Amino acid sequence: MSAEMIDRYRGVLVGSAAGDALGATVEFMDRHEIRSRYGRHTEIVGGGWLSLPAGEVTDDTQMALCIARSIAERGTFDSEDIADRFVEWYHSNPPDIGNTTRLALQYLAGGLDWREAGQRTNERMRPRDASNGSLMRCAPVALFARGDADALANHSADSSRITHANPLAVDACVALNAAIAALLDDPGCDPIEVATEAASEPEVRDVLVIVPGLGAEPEDASGFVLATLQCAFWAVTHHDTLEAAIVAAVNLGEDADTTGAVAGALAGARWGHQAIPTRWRDALLAHDELVTLADRLFALSNGRG
C-alpha cells in the first residue's frame, strides 16, 4: 500500500506540472484554434505566449512549489512562511503573475499581514478576484493534510486566503483538496461526491453536481475559478486514463495551463506517477524536485517527518 500511495503522491505533483507545461503552449487559444493548429495538442514542447523552453512550467507550478517547499522544510503548514516565499518568488520577476495574485503580493511586499493582504485584495477587486490563482497551486496541502479532515479544510482555505480571499476561490480549494485526498486513499472513489460534500458555497456545489451529466465538453474554460474546477473534474471523470484526462483538459483552451494543472493533480491522485507518459516525465525540468517533495510530504502526512 505504501508504494502505491507514494506513487499517487508523486502523481499529484508531477501530474499537475505536466498539465501546466502541456497547457502553457496553448494558453489563451480557443479550442477551435488549437484544433486548427495542432489537431490534438499532446506534447510538451514549450512555446506559447510566454515562449517557454520545452518542459518549463508557469506560475501555477512555481507557486505550488513555494507551498510544497515550505511544508517540506518546516514540517508543518505555515501561512506566514508561504506568504514570504510567494513574495520572494514575486521579487524574482516571473514572466507571468495573475492580476489578483500580483496585487496581493504587492500588499505583502509592502509589509501587510497575509490575512490583511488577501482581504484587502478581495475588497478592491471583487468579484474579479473569483479567479483560479489559488486553485492552481493548492494540491500540496492535500498531500500534507490527508487523513485530518479539519486540518485539510482549514489549511486549504488559508492557502487561498493569502492572495484569493473571495469565498468562491477559498471554497473551491477546499473542495478540490478534499477530492485529491480521497483519491489518494481510494482511487476508485467518486471525487465529485467528495468535493460536493466538502464545499460550503452553493455555487461551488452547483458546478460540481452537473459534471456527471455533461454530454459534451464544458463551454467555459476561462480563468473563473468555478469554470476551472468544473473543467478539471469533467476531464478526470469522463476519461479512462491520466493522459486522456490531461489532454482533454488542456485542449479546452483559454486558461489551458491552469485547467491542465488542476486536472493533472486530480488525475495524478487517481492514476499515479507511473501512469504519466514517460515522454512527459522526461521533458519536465522540475520533475526530480517534484518527486522529492512528494516523498517528503508523504512522510510528513504519515507522521514520519
Image (cartoon, grey):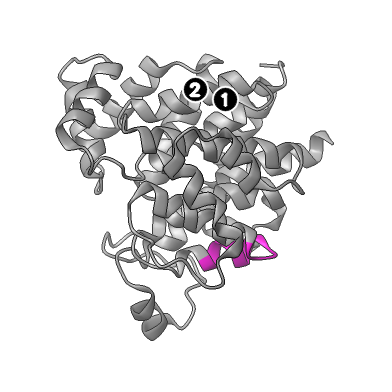
142 left or right, relative to 285: right
> Residue 155 shows which numbered tag?
2
**Place of residue 275 in the rendered image (x, y in percent of width and height, measured from the top left):** 70, 57
**Place of residue 208 in the rendered image (x, y in percent of width and height, measured from the top left):** 53, 50
**Magenta portion: prevailing SS class:** helix
Asked if one can make out residue 19 in the rendered structure from this viewpoint, the answer is no
Q: Is residue 118 shown above or below 34? A: above
**Place of residue 191 in the rendered image (x, y in percent of width and height, measured from the top left):** 65, 46
- Residue picked out by circle 1: 152
In front of the other: 132 or 123: 123
Quarter of the N terminus within the rendering = top right
Quarter of the C terminus within the rendering = top right
At horizontal 52% and vertical 59% (from top left) the residue drawn is 283
> Residue 122 shows which numbered tag?
none
**Place of residue 241 in the rendered image (x, y in percent of width and height, measured from the top left):** 68, 63
188 left or right, relative to 125: right
Whether residue 52 appears in magenta in the rendering, the answer is no
In front of the other: 3 or 165: 165
- At label 1, the amino acid type is Leu
| Contact, mark 1 vs mark 2 (Cβ under 8 Å) | yes
213 left or right, relative to 43: right
At horizontal 33% and vertical 66% (from top left) the residue drawn is 47
Q: Callout 1: few (<14), some (14-19), or many (20+) C-alpha neighbours within 10 Å?
A: many
Q: Is residue 59 shown above or below 84? A: below
- At label 2, the amino acid type is His
Label tally:
2
Q: Read off the magenta span.
A: 238-248
